[in-house]
Amino acid sequence: MLKSLFAAAAFLTILAATIFSQTNSTTVSREFQVAGYTRVRVASHSPAAVATAEREAFDLINKIRSDAGLVPLVWSDQVAALARLHSQDMADQKYFSHRGSDGSMVDERADKLGIGSWSAIGENIAFLRGYDEAVRFAVEKWMESPGHKKNILDQRWKETGMGVAILPDGTYYFTQVFLLRD
């Protein structure tokens, strides 16, 4: 009986080692479908991947606005820096909220960063882990949420910036800030 238990334990150990040894920093160990999207375990978090994700989200938002007959938003490096700071703060501190880890809201963070002369400011945030089309998934979920959709389709917004933080485990933090200057 004891021999059988040891044999079973050895087999399970070898099986587990075989399955888990297929994972490294550049390959995907397991994929599965959620709501039509493939969920993966590993995502690139390089600066190039982050910049690509930000630009893709910006382009998708402007496509949605264009399809709705609205003027496209203008990318602002200053507003993008504000959005990036919040996404990175959420990633570093492992939280998800419009309120920063220091208790600040988007308007206060904009003032601290020296973004002045605005009359309205808005923010969309998203958090997800491991989707191969994370940007599309986040934007799609924003469009399914009445408050986020309202921000995206609000005609008063003229400028925007997108900030994305990607962790090694495939966790994404998205922040989009909308701005109307005086």
Image (tube, rainbow, N blue to C red):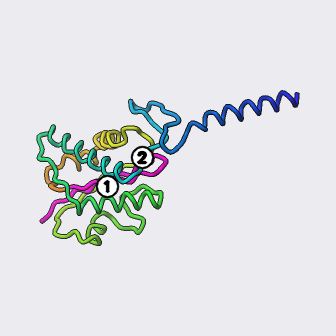
Q: Main secondary structure of the magenta part?
A: strand
Residue 26: x %, y % from top left: 48, 42
> In the rendered image, which quarter is residue 100 located in?
bottom left
Left or right: residue 34 compared with residue 108: right
Q: Nearer the viewer, residue 123 or 66?
A: 66
- Label 1 crowding class (10 Å Cα cut-off): few <14, some 14-19, many 20+? many
Residue 60: x %, y % from top left: 24, 42
Residue type of the residue flagged with mark 1 = Gly
Secondary structure, mark 2, is: loop
Left or right: residue 48 compared with residue 65: right
Q: Which residues are magenta?
A: 160-182
Residue drawn 76% across the image and 33% down it: 10
Mark linked to residue 91: none
- Label 2 crowding class (10 Å Cα cut-off): few <14, some 14-19, many 20+? some
Residue drawn 37% across the image and 62% down it: 99
* In magenta stretch: residue 181: yes
Q: Is residue 142 above or below residue 9?
A: below
Residue drawn 48% across the image and 31% down it: 32
Foreground: disc 2 or disc 1: 2
Quarter of the picture containing the C terminus is: bottom left
Residue type of the residue flagged with mark 2 = Ser
Mark linked to residue 163: 1
Q: Of callouts 2 and 1, which one flags the residue occurring earlier in the amino acid sequence?
A: 2
